[in-house]
Image (cartoon, grey):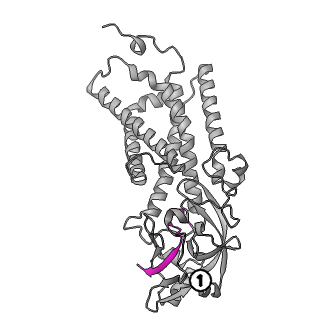
Amino acid sequence: MLRRGPFRPGAFRSAVHEPRAAVVLGRWLGAALLVCFATGLVSHLLQDPPGWLTGRQPSRPVAGYRFTQGLHVAAGLAAIPLTGAKLWTVYPRLFEWPPARSVRHLLERLAVALLVAAVLLELFSGLLNTLQWYPWPFPFRQTHYWTAWTAVGALLVHLAVKAPVIAAHWRRAVAVPLAGRRALLTATATAVGAVTLTTAGQSVPWLRALDLFAPRRPGSGSVPGGSGLPVNRTAAQAGTTVVPADWQLAVDGPKGFRIDLAGLRALPQTTADLPIACVEGWSANGRWTGVRLADLLRRAGVPAGSAVRITSLEAAGPYRVTELPARHADDPLTLLALALDGRPLTPDHGFPARLVAPNRPGVLQTKWVARIEVV
């Protein structure tokens, strides 16, 4: 049978479709994906800890989640041009003939197909998550988590199969490097650098001046009340634009009590600089003022070392009720915040009171708090 188009012999003439370029790009891409996987696990374990970790999530370092999640999103964005370059170097193999030379070759190709599909789904769903755009019917977070494990498993199979080729081309050949290969690698490194420099400012303060293409630009927001701290979910979206005039915080415990906003403001106040760090990759510091959560719990007779449940005024939503581990509840920097940057909280920032704790994902920094109770 006469083979036409990309299936004909010699259809791909570029000399850069070669093993050495693929191995170098594979090293770079593998490093980015491993960073994404490791930091993604940190985020998952903080939000959905398994039984053995429940109550043991650390509250320090204060900016721990800000660092790991910022690195997660930065590595994921960098992996997009790396994936494109890597696929370009090897895509002629899609048109090999015959498509399967043996059962082993068929299984190898199926593993590669699974790897490519998982990586593309992971990267582009993650990219759209940074934009808070979800044009699919499946839950993002659970799908993102299990797809990551699928990609890692397929990657290990691929590395095992390609180990001899990778070993043969791991080091630079003695011969003069191919000019086209050098141009490809230089262009790819430049693209990765440009993507990183123009997006990482959403979590790295000293790169904020270059933050041209990131979805969020902390510090440049127009939130009523004067703070530039962005918000992911407004009071209108949560249905909490009108707080009852007789609002009182309920603190449950052996000596449980209720207290209104004036009573909270009359208690000893603590001010702390703490970041809000969101899963989308952006983060920003705020100067929060409020009552230490531990002081409220001791007043209610709740012993130290107790985990607590925080309930919001929000009518519905996946984070309307959150649990705070004992280490966070007892941490002196964990506040029931009443003010941000010296001004009373606005509705979008959680008026009348919100939780702010160190080393905690932004989605778990509950706004519009109505009740605190021992788990």
Location of mark 1 (residue): 261
Total labels: the figure holds 1
Based on the displayed image, in which of its 4 quarters is residue 259 positioned? bottom right
Nearer-the-camera pick, 366 or 326: 366
Relative to 118, say whether 260 is above or below: below
**Left or right side of 49 for 16:** right
Image coordinates of residue 111 in percent, x first then y, are 35, 35
- In the rendered structure, which segment of residues is drawn in magenta? 359-375
Q: Say which amino acid is labelled 1.
A: Leu
Circle 1 SS class: helix
Query: Residue 355 in magenta?
Result: no
User: What residue sits 51% from the left and 82% below the top?
Assistant: 249
Relative to 175, say whether 320 is above or below: below
**Left or right side of 327 for 202:** right
Image coordinates of residue 315 in percent, x first then y, are 44, 69
Image coordinates of residue 313 in percent, x first then y, are 48, 73
Q: Residue furthest top?
A: 2
User: What residue sits 56% from the left and 24% below the top?
Assistant: 173
Relative to 263, say whether 94 is above or below: above
Residue 159 in view? no
Image coordinates of residue 239 in percent, x first then y, are 49, 67
